Image (cartoon, grey):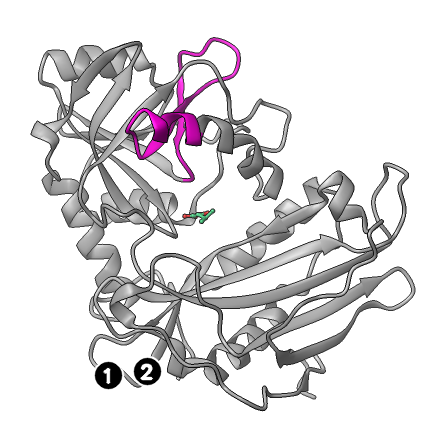
Amino acid sequence: MLKNELDVTLHKADTLKEKPDQNQLGFGRYFTDQMFTMRWNKEQGWHDAKIEPYGNFSLDPAAMVLHYSQEIFEGLKAYRGADDAASVLLFRPMDNLNRLNDSATRMCMPCIPANKVLQAMKGLIYLERAWIPESQGAALYIRPAMIATEAALGVRPANEYLFFIICSPVGAYYAEGFSPTKIYVEDEYVRAVQGGVGHVKTGGNYAASIKAHTTSQRKGYTQVLWLDAIERKYIEEVGTSNIFFVINGKLITPPLSGSILPGITRDTVLQLAQDWNIPASERRITIDEVLAAVEDGSLTEAFGSGTAAVISPIGELGYQGKTIIINNGETGPLAQRFFDGIEQLQRGAAPDPHDWLVRIK
Ligand code: COI
C-alpha cells in the first residue's frame, strides 16, 4: 500500500448492468456497477475500505441516522475530456472532500482522510469509466455520503459510521435544461438560520426544503428563492444552488453568512469573474432591491450556480402575487459565458490556471 492510499479491497460486480440511453438520463435515476464503502468506529478509526458491487446496505432499525439524521453528503462530477473522450477528469474534488470534512465537524462526525479518499474515488471512477456519458451537458455524478450506523436511541454523536461513494450518470438537473427557470420567492418557509446547519451539506437541510419546493411546483414554479429567516428580506439561495444577480454590469451574490452553502461552483464563478475582469461583490441584497432594479432596468440577469445544474438562468420571479420578468425571460450573456466557461474548464477545453482539474486517465 502506498503512503497516500487506503488499503482498499476490490470486489468487482460479477454481472454488469445495462447502460441507460445517454439522452434520457434525467438526474440521479441510474447507478453504476460498483460503490466504495468504509466504516468507522472509535477503536479502529476508518477501516474496511472496499470497492464492492453496488447494492443495499443492511442497517439496524435503531441506526442513529434513521432517527436523528446524522448524515452528510457531497456532489461532484466526472467528465470525459473534450479533446479525448477516453480521458476522465474531476473538477476541484479536494474542495468537495474538504467541505465534507467541514460538514463532519459541524455534525459531530469523524473527518475522512481526504487525500486517501480522493485516491480511492479515482480508483472507483476509473473502474466505472464506461458509465461516463459522452453527450453534451451530461456527466457522471459522484455522491460521497456518511451516515451514523450505531444502533442507539440516545441523542448524542454516534460511535459508528459508514462512508460511501456511489455514482450516477446524469443529464440536466432541471427539466428546462439550460433554459431560464421560473422561481417562487418564498416568504413563508425558510431554509436555514444563522447558527444552524445551512452552511453544511446535511440531508436535513434538503428535507426541510421539500415542503416549499413542492408547494411552489404546484404553483407552476421550478424552485424557490430563499429569504433570510429573521426578516424575510435578504436573499440567501435559490433551490439547491447559490444565486447571482447582474446589476449595472456588476455581479452580486450574498455573502457566506453562516446560513448559505459555500458552493464550489459559486467560488468558481467568483474566481472566473476576477480572471475575466468582471466586477463582482459578495454583499447582502434584499428582495426589494432586486425588484427595484428589475423595475428601473439596472438588473439585467439572475442565475443560480451549483454542481448539479452548473449555471441555471432565472427568467421569472413570482413574489407576493406579482410576476417579475428578468431579461425578457431569456438567458443573459453572463450566465451563458459562465456556463460555457465552466463547462470548457471541466472538460479540459480551456486553460486551467487554478489547477482545478484532476485527471484520472
Ligand atoms: C448541487 O447542485 O450542488 C446540489 O447539491 C444538488 C443536489 C442536492 C442534487
**Tags 1 and 2 touching, CB below 8 Å:** yes
Mark 2 nearby-residue class (10 Å; few <14, some 14–19, many ≥20) = some
The answer to whether residue 66 shows anywhere in this view is: yes
Whole-percent x, y for residue 247 in the image:
18, 24
Residue under circle 2?
87
In the displayed structure, 16 sits above or below 140; it is: below
Is residue 167 magenta-colored? no
> Measuring 47% from the left and 31% from the top, which residue is drawn there?
256
Whole-percent x, y for residue 55 in the image:
63, 72
> Measuring 38% from the left and 78% from the top, which residue is drawn there?
19
Mark 1 nearby-residue class (10 Å; few <14, some 14–19, many ≥20) = few
Is residue 236 magenta-colored? yes
Q: Residue furthest front?
A: 218
Residue under circle 1?
84
In the displayed structure, 236 sits above or below 136; it is: above
> Measuring 66% from the left and 86% from the top, which residue is drawn there?
2
**Quadrant position of residue 292:** top left
Q: Secondary structure at mark 2?
A: loop
In the displayed structure, 111 sits above or below 49; it is: above
Q: Secondary structure at mark 1?
A: loop
Quarter of the image for the N terminus: give it.
bottom right
Q: Which residues are magenta?
A: 213-240
Frontmost residue, 192 versus 209: 209
Whole-percent x, y for residue 71 in the image:
67, 48
